[in-house]
Each structure stands twice: as C-alpha cells, then as structure tokens.
Image (cartoon, coloured by chain):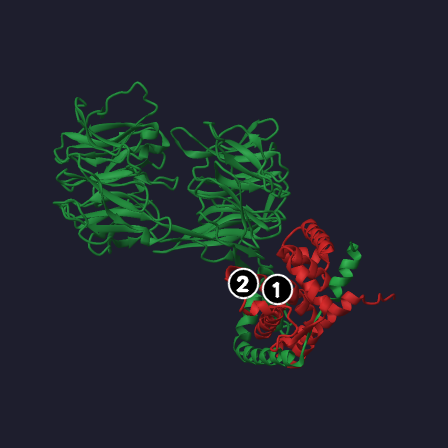
Chain colours: A red, B green
C-alpha cells in the first residue's frame, strides 16, 4: 500500500488541531506555544495596519486574551494561524477607524510611533522595518491588509478571499495596486 | 524603482521584536483568562454538547440513533427492527409572512416551497432557513417536479384576469405555462405529463377529479361525484391516481389507472378517510382515518399496503392523534412534511354602552373554537346559538359554558361547510340558517331551537347560496337574506321571495349582501358595492324596494366594511374591516370610531361577524387566529 507523505500544510493543520484540542482543555503550555509560534506574524500584521508599535502590541495582547478566554470559539477553527491573523487584522482595522475619528495632537501617544528612542518603548524595530511599516501605513487599509495577510500572514489569496468574504480577483487587485504603491514609496 | 519581488522581500523582512516584558504580559493575561473560561465552561459543557447535538437534523438524528443502539443492542431479539422504527421529527424554520397554503417539501428534502399570504411563492432552505421569493401572484397548492427544478402553482400574471397553472424554476424563478386553464392543482405527476385538479359543478355540492394532459391539454375525468373533498394524488410511477369518495355512507379510498381501466378501491375502513398520500416507493398509501367514539373522535394516521392494482391486507395504524396535523407531501427522500396549527381564536364578547356605542370594557374570550362557523343571540340575550357541522350548540352568553346541543341531520352538508349566517327570531320560535337538504340541495331553512322541527323555507341554487345571512324582521314574520348579489325578503308564513334591491345595468359586478333588518322592520340594511368599491357603503332599502338610502359610507377611508350589524335601536353600526379591529359608526352620518382591537390574541388575528346583543349592551364577534408550524418526519412507516 502506498502511503502519501503528509504535506507541510497538512502537518501544520494536524499540529494546530492538537494545539486547539489542548487549548480547549485549558492547557496553558499550549497557549504559550501558540503565542510564540505566531507572535511575530501577528505583530507584523498589527504593525502594518496601525503603524504604531504600542497599538500593535495592545492589539495582539487583546486578541490573545480574548482567544484564551473563549475556547468555545475554536471549535470551528480549521486554520489556527488564519484565525488569529483575521482576529488581529479585524481588531487593528477597528482600532484604526477609531483613531481616525479622534483628534490627534502632537502630545499624543501616536506621536511616538516609530520612535525607537522613546523611553517607554518595549518593541524594537529596525530602521528598514520602520520605513516599511510607515510605507504600509500610507496605503489604503484594504490594500495594506491584503499585503500584510499575504506576506506576513502567509495566507494564500484564496484564504484571504474566504476570510474577508470577497472575490479572489478583488484580493489580487488590491494586492497588485498595493505593491505598485509600495514600489513608489520604498 | 524596485521590482515587485524586491518589494515583497523587503516587506517580508520588516519585523517587530517583542521583548520579554511584552511576552510575559500577554501570556499572563491570556493564561488568567483561559483559567477563568475553563472554570466557567465546565459548568456549561453538558448543555453545550446538547446544544451542538440539537443544532441540526443530522446530529440530532445521529444522537438519537446512538442512544437507540446503546439501549437496544443488548436486547438481541428484535433490536434491529426497533431501531428502524425510530421516528425522527424536526421543525422547519418559520416563514414570514404567514402562509396561505400547505406548502411542499422538495424531492431531496432540502427546500420547502409555500405560497405566503401575500401570494408570493417562497422557497426556503430547510437547513438554514434562508428564504427566496421567486414569484408573485401565486395561490393554492404547490407541487415540485420530480427533479426538484420546478414548482407548479396557480399563478395570475399582472393585468391578466384568469390565472393559469405555471411551472416556476425553483432557482431562477423563470416561468412557463403548464395549463392555461384556471383553477387550482392538487398534484403534478412525477413524469411531468399530467396535472391533477379538483373541480366543483354548479348546483352540485360535490367534486370532480380531473387529470389534465400538460402537452395536449386533454382532460380525463377520473371521478365524477366524490361527495367529499377527494384529496387526489399521483402514484410515484405516474400510473395511478388515488382519491377519496363517499359512497353509500362509507368513505372509500380509490386508486384509478390514468387512461386505463385499472381500478381498485378500499371500502372497509370503519370511519372517514382523508389526505391519502403515496409512500415514495409506491408500496403504501397513508391516510388520516377518523373514527367516532362515544363523545370522542379518534383521528389517527393509517397505512395500507398496495401492490400494483391491489391492496394487500388491512390498514394498520402508524401514528395516533393526528387531528391537528395537515399533511403537505411525502418527498422522495422519505420525509413526510406536515403542519400543525395553534387555533387561538374563538367567540369574544365586548361590553358596550348602548347610548354611545363605545366600548365599556375590554374584549373577553367567551369560548375558544377554531373556524368561522356562524352564531346568533337568543332573543333574551342569555344564550348564544353556535352552528356546527352536525347541528347547533348553545352556550351561556355570560360564561361561554355549553348548555346543550341539537343535532340537525336533515340539513347537514357533506362538504364540510355549513353556510354563513344564522338568526334567531325575536319571538324565539325559530332559528333561520342556510344548509343542504338531505346533504345535497342548498336552501334557507328554519329550525325550532330544540331541533324538533326543521323545514325548508326557500330552495336556493349554487354551492355558495348557503351563505345567505338570514335576518329576521322585528315582528318575526319575514326573513331577509342575500342571494346571488341581491337581497330578498320572504314571508315565513308562505309565499314567494321578493327581491328588495333594485336591478342594475351591470348586474354581474353588483354586489348586495349580508343583510340586516332595520329595527323598524320596514327596510333592510345591506353591504352594497360595485367591484373594487365593495365594502365602502351600507344602504338600506324598504322591503317593497321603493326607497333606498345610504346609512354609512367609508369612501376615502383606508378601511372598509367586511361584516356588520346594527344596534337594537338602529343608531349605530358595528363592523369589522377584515383585520384585528372592530369599529362603530353612527347611522346618521357621524364619523366611525374604533371600539376594540384584538391584535393581542396573536399574529394574524382578525375579527368578523359582530352581533349586537338584543339589549344593546354587548357585542359578540368571532376571532380567527391561526399560527402554523411546519415539520418533517423521517421513518414514517413502522417495520412490520
């Protein structure tokens, strides 16, 4: 009998299913594994959308706490990575909208975004990363979201389309336009 | 400028590095949240599991099957049979607005089609409850094609006077004509070649079963006079038609070959048969069987095996107590669709001030009862006589308690409809009502309140002639009644009826009906109108037909008159517009005013047939309120 070796995607899916199972049983070590496995991607997505290291950190923090508090939500989760990325992206977008509605003064925390010398900062970004995030921040949110989910989140266009309930053509268009703009900005 | 690939690489390299403090904060908070959640979730885990199981039909059935296996497997003898006997019932999501028809389940059981009260054909996904409106102007029974791609229904197109039978695509709503003939359909043969219809004939309170060839429009009369509603259906192989008839006092189940001589009937059921349906494999016919007991009726679901052109064995009971179940169809996937209804209506009483015509209290349900059977006050205002299919019942006007009943076999109709309107003579000697003499000939009858004497006063023609709304003059000597869009009066002591309403050039479009004798006994009030203006005006014409005057006009109002009555002194009209409201209006031209609203009885509640008490201090009226729920049943037939 020929046994087809599992693909990388299948292995990840299997590993995630085990993690989800452990999470639902309240295993905090599983929670740590999930966090360390996906933290960087989640932070990158949040940062891309918010261009604010503190806001990005808070966003990931909130998503993780919510994620840990409602293990029942995980039953329908087939793709843990995609699920977390979608949560972070949604929360970041909502946060971004709220920020846009609020008047911003120079003294606000927003002014510290990207400032590596800020004494209270807990995140360190390289100069290039800062520049990239600033460029991403200049894109329309929809384009930024697709680019960051695809590049940082490593989601396929099909997965993004499914998660955002949009056609794959729309997703590809947004990605293409976004990359074109980044070419001009970087 | 950099290439797209280079841009992607740059973006990919862009990272933030979280420090340990950040990690610790996130993980501490998340761990705390998880512990709290787990503590809470243990409390609801059992309920959660139960909810998950009950979430959809498949898991429910699976859980039931598992339970059955766990319980029954140890019982080695007959375990398999018992498991197979498990009947699964699930409710379909509700359809808004309410339904006007029975509806039908698609052959695969995934969709349910029904005509709503707005005459829209709606298709519902039985799993999600999602509804799609696919056609308008529809009415009556809906039937799915064998492949589930089309739905046959009676449809009236905009601007068209006559409806047609149309096949409507269940996905696109595209329509094609199956038959240009008007009239409802009962079934569509699985091979798509034939339609089944039930037709009535003038002056014959009976029914025909007719098969229409869709291609040639040729008609085949399968049964001529069934005497009862025949509930015809096609067999799954399209060769046979089953129907019910009443012959020699017995209820008979017939199976007739289409265009052939094959025929078989079952005559031995000790009761009344209705709603026969073929099983998807054509091996059984199930039907509702009603059997009379002493002070009790048993209505159960029965099944009779059929092989080719012969019945095998005797009917066996399948489900008990199916009185409230109306069967829609038995789809090819084996699911039996049916509906049950809460009938929340009844006879209500409303106290009123005789001087002002205004309500003196809230409406009160006197007695709960379904349907729209007629009723009237006794002359002393202490009793209410209520019409039933078998005769009359008398209830207390105060408590609603039944005091006695009277059987009237002489005028019992066999079509399940007793006629509209009844009236008790002011001298208390007679009650006038419509009915069928010998069960077949329509007429206006008089009966003594104890049922000891019943006589035909006027012979009428036409099935709907029994809706004659008789009304007594104050001296108890004459009766006015509605008949063929005119008002007539007839002397109780003898003589020919005389028409009261003046002739019209356009007699067909004229409508004068629902008469009420004016208190002076010299003229009759009635609802008058032409075509769409029906329900706008009340006129009163002297019994010699010489003088007509208007006593109420609702022209320009957004409501009309459906049924009305006069106060004993003739100063007020009480009327129902055909919804949940009851209105009153002075007959001297004053503005109408609302006196009651029975919306709180339930959704779609509507009031009708108000009757002012002889003393003028109360109004009784009927309320209809039916709320339906639709169900599907799997594994209908028990293993034998």
| Residue B214: mark | none
Quick check: can you spot residue B102? Answer: yes
- Residue depicted at x 42% and y 34%: B206
Q: Position of residue B262 (x, y in %)?
A: 60, 36
Foreground residue among B17 and A110: A110
Q: Position of residue B304 (x, y in %)?
A: 55, 50
Q: Position of residue B325 (x, y in %)?
A: 46, 52
Q: Position of residue B67 (x, y in %)?
A: 59, 70
Please name the residue that numbered disc 1 is placed on. Answer: A50
Q: Same subunit under labels 2 and 1?
A: yes
Please name the residue that numbered disc 2 is placed on. Answer: A99
Circles 2 and 1: CB atoms closer than 8 Å? yes
> Does B580 appear above or below B533?
below
Quick check: can you spot residue A79? Answer: no
Q: Chain of mark 1?
A: A
- Of all residues shown, which one is farthest toward the top? B505
Q: Chain of mark 2?
A: A
Horizontal side of residue B369 vs B287, given as left or right: left
Q: Residues within 10 Å of mark 2 (few under 14, many from 20)?
A: few
The quarter of the picture where residue B445 lies is top left
The quarter of the picture where residue B508 lies is top left
Image quadrant in which the C terminus of chain B is located: bottom right
């Amino acid at each position: 009998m020929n046994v087809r070796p599992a693909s990388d995607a299948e292995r990840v899916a299997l590993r995630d299913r085990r993690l989800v199972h452990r999470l639902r049983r309240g295993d905090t070590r599983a929670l740590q594994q999930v966090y360390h496995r996906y933290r960087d991607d989640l932070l990158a997505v949040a940062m891309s959308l918010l261009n604010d290291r503190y806001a990005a950190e808070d966003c990931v923090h909130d998503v993780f706490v919510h994620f840990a508090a409602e293990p029942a939500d995980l039953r329908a989760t087939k793709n843990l990575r995609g699920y977390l990325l979608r949560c972070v992206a949604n929360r970041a977008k909502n946060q971004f909208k709220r920020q846009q509605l609020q008047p911003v003064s120079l003294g606000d925390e927003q002014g510290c975004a990207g400032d590596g010398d800020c004494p209270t900062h807990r995140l360190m970004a390289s100069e290039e990363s800062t520049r990239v995030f600033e460029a991403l921040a200049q894109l329309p949110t929809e384009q930024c979201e697709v680019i960051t989910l695809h590049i940082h989140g490593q989601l396929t266009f099909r997965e993004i389309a499914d998660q955002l309930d949009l056609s794959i053509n729309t997703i590809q268009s947004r990605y293409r336009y976004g990359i074109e703009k980044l070419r001009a900005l970087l | 400028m950099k290439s797209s690939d280079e841009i992607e690489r740059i973006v990919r390299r862009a990272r933030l590095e979280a420090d340990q403090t950040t990690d610790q904060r996130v993980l501490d908070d998340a761990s705390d949240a998880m512990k709290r959640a787990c503590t809470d979730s243990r409390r609801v885990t059992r309920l959660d599991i139960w909810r998950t199981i009950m979430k959809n039909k498949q898991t429910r059935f699976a859980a039931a099957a598992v339970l059955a296996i766990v319980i029954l497997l140890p019982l080695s003898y007959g375990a398999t049979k018992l498991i197979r006997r498990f009947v699964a019932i699930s409710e379909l999501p509700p359809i808004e607005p309410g339904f006007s028809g029975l509806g039908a389940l698609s052959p695969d059981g995934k969709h349910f089609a029904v005509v709503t009260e707005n005459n829209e054909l709606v298709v519902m996904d039985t799993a999600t409850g999602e509804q799609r409106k696919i056609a308008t102007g529809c009415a009556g029974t809906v039937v799915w094609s064998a492949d589930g791609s089309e739905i046959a229904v009676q449809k009236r197109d905009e601007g068209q006077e006559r409806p047609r039978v149309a096949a409507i695509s269940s996905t696109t709503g595209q329509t094609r004509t199956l038959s240009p003939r008007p009239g409802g359909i009962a079934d569509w043969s699985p091979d798509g070649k034939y339609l089944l219809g039930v037709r009535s004939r003038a002056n014959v309170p009976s029914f025909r079963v007719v098969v229409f060839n869709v291609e040639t429009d040729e008609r085949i009369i399968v049964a001529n006079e069934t005497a009862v509603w025949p509930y015809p259906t096609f067999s799954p192989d399209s060769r046979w038609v089953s129907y019910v008839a009443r012959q020699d006092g017995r209820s008979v189940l017939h199976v007739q070959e289409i265009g052939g001589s094959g025929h078989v009937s079952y005559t031995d059921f000790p009761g009344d048969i209705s709603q026969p349906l073929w099983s998807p494999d054509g091996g059984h016919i199930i039907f509702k069987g009603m059997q009379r007991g002493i002070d009790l009726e048993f209505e159960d679901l029965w099944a009779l095996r059929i092989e080719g052109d012969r019945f095998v064995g005797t009917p066996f009971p399948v489900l008990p107590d199916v009185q409230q179940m109306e069967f829609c169809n038995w789809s090819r996937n084996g699911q039996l669709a049916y509906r049950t209804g809460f009938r929340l209506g009844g006879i209500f009483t409303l106290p009123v001030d005789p001087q002002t015509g205004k309500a003196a209290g809230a409406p009160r349900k006197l007695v709960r009862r379904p349907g729209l059977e007629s009723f009237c006050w006794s002359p002393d205002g202490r009793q209410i006589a209520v019409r039933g299919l078998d005769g009359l019942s008398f209830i207390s006007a105060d408590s609603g308690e039944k005091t006695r009943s009277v059987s009237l076999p002489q005028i019992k109709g066999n079509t399940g409809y007793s006629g509209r309107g009844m009236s008790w003579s002011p001298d208390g000697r007679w009650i006038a009502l419509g009915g069928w003499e010998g069960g077949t000939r329509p007429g206006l009858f008089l009966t003594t309140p104890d049922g000891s004497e019943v006589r035909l006063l006027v012979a009428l023609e036409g099935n709907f002639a029994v809706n004659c709304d008789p009304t007594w003059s104050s001296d108890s000597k004459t009766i006015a009644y509605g008949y063929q869009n005119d008002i007539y009066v007839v002397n109780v002591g003898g003589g020919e009826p005389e028409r009261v309403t003046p002739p019209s050039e356009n007699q067909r479009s004229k409508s004068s009906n629902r008469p009420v004798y004016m208190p002076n006994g010299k003229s009759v009030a009635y609802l008058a109108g032409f075509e769409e203006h029906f329900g706008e005006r009340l006129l009163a014409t002297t019994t010699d037909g010489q003088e007509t005057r208007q006593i109420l006009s609702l022209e320009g109002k957004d409501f009309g008159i459906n049924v009305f009555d006069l106060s004993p002194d003739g100063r007020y009209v009480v009327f129902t517009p055909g919804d949940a409201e009851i209105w009153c209006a002075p007959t001297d031209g004053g503005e109408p005013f609302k006196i009651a609203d029975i919306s709180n009885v339930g959704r779609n509640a509507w009031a009708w047939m108000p009757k002012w008490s002889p003393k003028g201090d109360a109004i009784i009226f009927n309320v209809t309120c039916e709320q339906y729920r639709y169900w599907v049943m799997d594994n209908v037939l028990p293993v034998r």
